[in-house]
Image: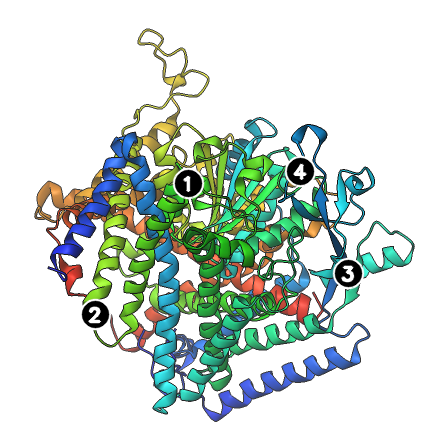
Amino acid sequence: MSVTMNTPTSGNRLLWISLMVFGMVGLSLNAFARKDGMAHGYVEVKEVERVQVTVVQSAGAGAASADAELKWVAPTDPKIASGEYTRVAGVAPRAWTVESLVPAKEAAMMMTARDAGDLTVERVEPSAINTFGIWIAAFLTLGIFSFLYRDNPWYKVAESVLIGVSAAYWMINAFWSTLVPNLFGALAPTLVRAVASPDLPVSSSPNSDFWLAVVPLILGFMLLWRLAPKGGWISIWPIAFIIGTTAGLKLVSGIEADLMAQAVATMQPLVVLNPADSATATASSFSFSAISFWGSIGSVVSVVGVLSVLTYFFFSLEHKGAVGKTARVGVWFLMITFGSAFGLTVMGRITLLAQRFEFLFTDWLNIG
Amino acid sequence: MLKRTIPILILATSGAILVVAYFSPFTTNWSEVVLMWFNILAAVAYVLGAGNLLAVNLEKVSSRRAGWAYALITLVAFASMLTFGLFKIGGVPSEAHPDVPYAGDYESTQSAFGWVYEYMLSPLTATMFALLAFYVASAAFRAFRAKNLESILLLGTAFIILLAQTAAGMFLTGWIPADSVFAFLRFDSLRIAITEYIQTAGMRAITIGIAIGIAATSLRLILGVDRSYLSKQ
Amino acid sequence: MTNTSHSNHSSNATQSSGIRGFLAGLSSLDRRWIFLGVALAVGIPILLKLSLPEVPGPMARATFNAIEKIPSGSRVLLAFDYDPASQGELQPMANALVHHCASRGHNIVFMALWPLGKQLADKTIKDVLKEFHPEYVEGTNYVQLGFKTGNEGVIKLMTTAITEQYPNDASGAALTDIPLMSGVNKLSEFKLIGTISAGYPGAKEWVQYADGASPEAFTLVAGSTGVQVSQLLPYYPKQLEGLLVAVKGAAEYEMLVTEKYPVARHQGRLEEGRRRMGPQLVAHLLVIGLIVLGNVAMIAARGAKGGAR
């Protein structure tokens, strides 16, 4: 693509500016002049209450042990009434609310149903913080789209936010999902249970678990050494470990799933029979009507395709004569492959755009 | 020794353990240990990535290089999100253990972390990729030129797939009876013929080629023939 | 996305006049007009709620049948290996897949190889599982394992030691205390594994590491983005028994699922894929038009310069 760097000419610019002004006016009208307005966040509200209980030991289990099992359950738990659980005296109940998002259209339906006396429908409330969120999301979405006109500060702000937020998101998720249970859980199980993960299973061999977790801890610190200005070689140890593991994983599975399985999938009967005839086919019962014409063509095409493309990839032979001709057929196969892949890519990208427009139209503008 | 021999040994051992475990169930325990370490190190890699981002942007801000204000925005976004997540700010307590401080959920929209995910991270990543729709269309206009047989094959296939994937395919060729001799001309039949036979064959050859390449590289690494990673300091 | 150059055709106006000159000038058209065209081609059908018929193809049917044929109450694993960037294509598949599994009475174990996949699994549990199948109890009928770092390392470790990889589920309950996971320590204990996959790590890795380890133990199906699907075609139908191709596959599968298992309310949650086929049609026609126009402009420009190269 040889496009020259150019600012829009005045005529062009006028057109673009009028388009944008048109959009702004429409937006304001939509926001303030319409009865429903735009961008409504709603949440479904659920109240949760928990009380601490002890599990009453059955008579056969011996005298109440010192570390009787403590639990938090709903105050309405039937086991409290039946006496299986007893409330722990002196521990205050805990109560909080759980809110979850509801799309505006469904919220309206749910609120009408509840107002009409249907208490099976959950309580839905308008939520200012989520309404504000929809505006923020729209602001950032349009900021990214503004890049299509030209690079500009609005886009850059949105991009900077994305970089910062996603790096932190990944790191936090790695921390809570893997480092805490799988690493710290082995190094300091008591602490992890007290602070973050009370139900962390008790290991049968805590000592060996501890020492087995020390290794990745050390390797982890060595990997983080990359951030230090000196001692670059230190991080080579964990990197060697990562490369070695990856190589070990890929060596076997690559050969199995991508080489052998693919070779087997290619070596199929070239003459494909109709499903009804395939069970009874013998040499004596040969008939052309039993053969699936397009199935057989497909099989032949597949084999020719795989072999010719492989020939094209075979660079240690000069692509001349028969080899050259086969390789050329391989190129045709590749072109069709890429053409199809292009079609599928267009399809994918358009869908992602459609999803963003749905957000803008439905959630933000409230016109969808 | 520290800089060469030990890394080569680490690589060979970890790789060999995984390969051997495939063939011998007796060493599965070893491979499990190696994999657990590997997965933990992957988590550390996320921390490393965040650390790198921090270093680059801090440097940009402190030396007032061009665009340092944007680097500052990145840093603020990063630091806020980190605080929200580490301390589970606004998070919902765990129903089973409301008394344990960090046992609760931090990913619902009620918590600051989940809110930022819902209204900032999610729309931003989605829109970034949605932008590509525009560039694909622009590339279709500028780069797809029918110059020779190869490019005509590519274009023709793209046309068929683009039409066949939507109702246009049914509209244009749906009138051809599905059981007639000409049924193969229906766009839906052509689409299946292209993807299941030709594209599959092309991709199968590519997959085989890549598999051979990866297997050879892996073997060279494990056997210590390829040592290029040692210079990545 | 660093190429910010734009052009307009007045800067290199051709000397020739008439239609040929106009067409030749097109080749230097400001691409923002193309962008506007794409926006309209996608936006207008959405506003008009353009809806089109779909005919399920063999790959969508294969996916549907794979979930139908395992006995009701089977333990299935659904891996959410994507992020919001691909939810336009993949969320419809996730919704239909979860509704299908629950309608068949399968017990569902959720997990994610992508950091943001867990959020999308949570969303699917809330929007589909709890909405259409309120009888599903966490721990007995479904479990959310959540995300783990390690990519294919996670899959490989799960082939022999799930409880080592996941000592707890995402809510913190010990896996050994969860009825649905009791005694389950290997991927081969699942009847079916479904991956909704946007790239690496995803469906390819599930084929290589899970299916490779025990090819006979379970059925593997995948929902894939349009971009990634080329890589997966060689695995279908031997290694991947079902494959949903982009939003078209989602729409077809949605149709098969809702035809057999209709829902009483909030049907829109299971129509996302079909809804997005309207803009798809118009945008595809636009792309075809653009390719044709680009070639016409090339030919016209050649003529305007007075002969081909």
Image position, residue C12 (x, y; %): 35, 86
Q: Which label was assigned to residue C158?
A: 1
Mark 3 burial class by Cα count in 10 Å: few <14, some 14-19, many 20+: many
Mark 1 burial class by Cα count in 10 Å: few <14, some 14-19, many 20+: many
> Secondary structure under badge 4?
helix
Image position, residue A228 (x, y; %): 27, 74
* Quadrant including the N terminus of chain B: bottom left
> Secondary structure under badge 1?
helix
Q: Which residue is mark 4?
A: C259
Of residues A332 and C260, which is closer to you in this image? C260
Q: Which residue is mark 2?
A: A232
Spatial CA distance of label 4 from label 1 is 35 Å
Mark 4 burial class by Cα count in 10 Å: few <14, some 14-19, many 20+: few
Taking the spot 66% from the left edge, 38% from the top edge, the residue there is C259
Q: Nearer the viewer, mark 4 or mark 3?
A: 3
Query: In this orientation, does residue A20 appear?
Result: yes
Quadrant in which residue B211 is drawn: top left
Mark 2 burial class by Cα count in 10 Å: few <14, some 14-19, many 20+: some
Q: Nearer the viewer, mark 4 or mark 2?
A: 2
Quadrant in which residue A361 is drawn: bottom right
Quadrant in which residue C276 is drawn: bottom right
> Secondary structure under badge 2?
helix
Spatial CA distance of label 3 from label 2 is 56 Å
For disc 3, the chain is A
